[in-house]
Amino acid sequence: MDNAEVVIAQVNARMPRVHGDTFVHIRDIDFMVPYDEPLLEFETVVSDEIAGRIGKFVAQIIQDGDTIQVGYGSIPNAILEQLNIKSTSVFIQSSLPTALLNS
């Protein structure tokens, strides 16, 4: 924003408040547009047969206590679904896939 000639901000009441370096002072905004709309959401892809087979194979080589990093999509979801039976695996991710929230 420091290099912008004009700063236009949409104010959406549905946007959640988050912490970090996310605040913009009103004096830094040239034009404010109040417009409420639904937020975009990531929708998970249902695991297909191939993703399920990959998930099952990968889950077999992950031991209790292992640390893994997962992303989004049908293969990571299939892996997490297969890891349901493991009790001490640790997952690191900036945001959690639906399959992990459901376990």
Image (spheres, rainbow, N blue to C red):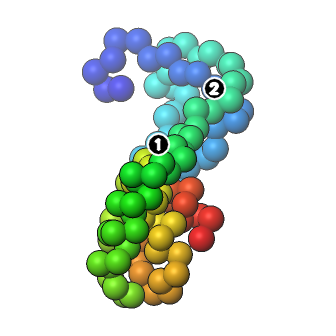
Answer with left or right where residue 57 lies relative to residue 49: left
Q: Secondary structure at mark 2?
A: strand
Inspect the image, locate mark 1, and give the three-letter code of the amino acid beneath it. Thr
Residue 47 visible in rendering: yes
Q: Quadrant of residue 59?
A: bottom left
Q: Position of residue 65 (x, y in %)?
A: 37, 87
Residues packed near mark 2 inside 10 Å, few (<14), some (14 to 19) or many (20 plus): few
Q: Is residue 18 above or below residue 37?
A: below
Q: Residue at x 31, y 26 (%)?
A: 2
Q: Position of residue 52 (x, y in %)?
A: 44, 58
Q: Nearer the viewer, residue 69 or 32?
A: 69
Q: Quadrant of the N terminus?
A: top left
**Residue visible at 51% across and 25% down?**
27
Image-based side of 1 in relation to 95, left or right: left
Q: Which residue is mark 2?
A: 11
User: Label 2 amino acid?
Assistant: Val
Per the image, label 1 sits on a secondary structure element best described as loop
* Residue displayed at 33% across by 65% down: 69
Looking at the image, which residue is at 59% across and 64% down? 101
State whether residue 57 is above or below residue 12: below
Q: Which mark is residue 22?
A: 1
The mark nearer the N terminus, 2 or 1, is: 2
Distance from Cα at disc 2 to Cα at disc 1: 14 Å
| Residue 86: mark in rendering | none
